[in-house]
Image (cartoon, helix red, strand yellow):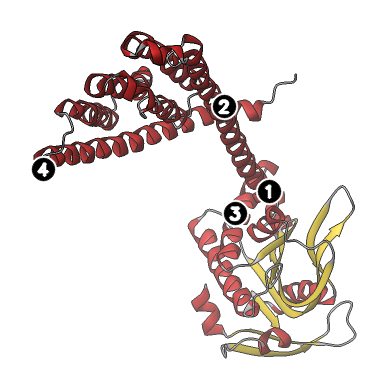
Amino acid sequence: MRANPGFDSASRGFDSLFEETILHLEARMARIVAIGGAVVTLLVLGGIRLGSPTPPIILAVPVTFFVWYLGIRLLLKAGLFRPWMRYASSLVDVSLGSVVTLLDVHANGSLYTVTAAGPAFYAVGVVMATLRLQPGLCLFAGLAAAAQLVAVMMLAVRPGLSPELLATGVGDLTVVLGKAIFLVTIGVLGMVASRSMRWMLLRLTESALERERVRSVLGMHVSEQVMEHLLSGHVPGGVERRAITVCFTDIRDFTRLSESQPAEETVRLLNLYYGRMCEIVAAHGGLVNKFLGDGMMIVFGAPTHQPDDAQRALAAARDMLAEADRMRESGEFPGLRIGVGLHRGEAVVGNVGGAQRQEYTAIGDTVNTASRVQDLTKVLGRSLLLTRECREALADSTFEPLGSHAVKGRLQQLELFSLRESEAQQAA
């Protein structure tokens, strides 16, 4: 069988996580049993003081459990608990059946013990081993319980039975062995259940690790919004028409900047620039749809509907302009200046592509117009331009009207606005 490196990695991580889990289970079990032992001890003491015929020796059972599991809890807190102690605890658990049975023989005789509930405590001890999610421990508990049952019944209970009762088959070795096999069967079933639960937890851990790996890879190629839609299966197979705000950005004189330095330095600066801009876009709930050389196409209002998509787009544009100025003035990206164009309108959004690869994008005249508006920032010498359609969706009054301008590919002219000079300086 071909090895699965991802699964092996998950298995290694799971072993550590699983050990923490069973230690947590051990601590909870120790707490519950210690409290139970203390409560039973108080009840027995109260009964004895009130004149109950309960023999005082019965106190040995709850006191033993209280002391033992209190010690286990203290060892867990101190970090001194060791795996072999689980086997010791399991032996104490199954021995409860032997102790109760022997006490019944001492106090009430063998005849009473045969019909009493003492032997049932063996099964309780085996079940407690199952709760520790250790397959080997379950089998050990089943075998230990079976061995103690046979020893106690044949050496302590059977000798006290009358010949008449023995003649009925009560106390026969075959009957006792049948009960012992039942206890071993419970241990085997517990072992199977523990293995199954361990395997299920391992697969869940592997699935979680794989999901995080996919998220990490997807996060490098698509936005957080699209990634969440893809992983949740909510991205529709078709497309839809909706009103969105589209933002295009471009680095001024990037060709000249890239010609004056090595290609590796150009890539480093671009990665730095894109990293900062993507953080800003994500903070405002936008979708970086495409990297276009030294530019970006950003969408607000898709794939998740945003009633304030225009406000988000404007806020992101201002922050991007301010960050570009900061990067230039600090020397992180010498000579960096950008232009931003905004337009709002209806577009078709959804998955576009073939069976092998699809891309979530926006298509339509709104997208083309936003790109042309960004081109006009160079012509008009403005860092930010937005159309009348975008302006009408804003409650902001700090815009300077620039009149109507012709754009390539459109018969009608566009009415454009820009930040007022004072606002532009404040944003910078």
Residue at label 4? 50
How far is disc 3 from disc 4 in space, using C-alphas? 78 Å
Quadrant in the rendering for residue 336: bottom right
First of labels 3, 4 by sequence position: 4
Tell me the CA gap for discs 2 and 1. 34 Å
Amino acid type at mark 2 = Arg
Element class at badge 3:
helix
Identify residue for label 3: 275
Q: Amino acid at mark 1?
A: Leu
Q: For the residues marked 2 and 4, what is the alpha-carbon distance in whole angstroms?
A: 48 Å
Determine whether 264 is above or below 305 in the image. Answer: above
Q: Residue at x 47, y 14 (%)?
A: 169
Is the residue marked by circle 2 packed among few (<14), some (14-19), or many (20+) residues within 10 Å?
Answer: some
- Residue linked to disc 1: 218
* Residue in view at x 53 percent, y 28 percent: 194
Q: Nearer the viewer, residue 303 or 167?
A: 167
Q: Which residue is mark 2?
A: 195
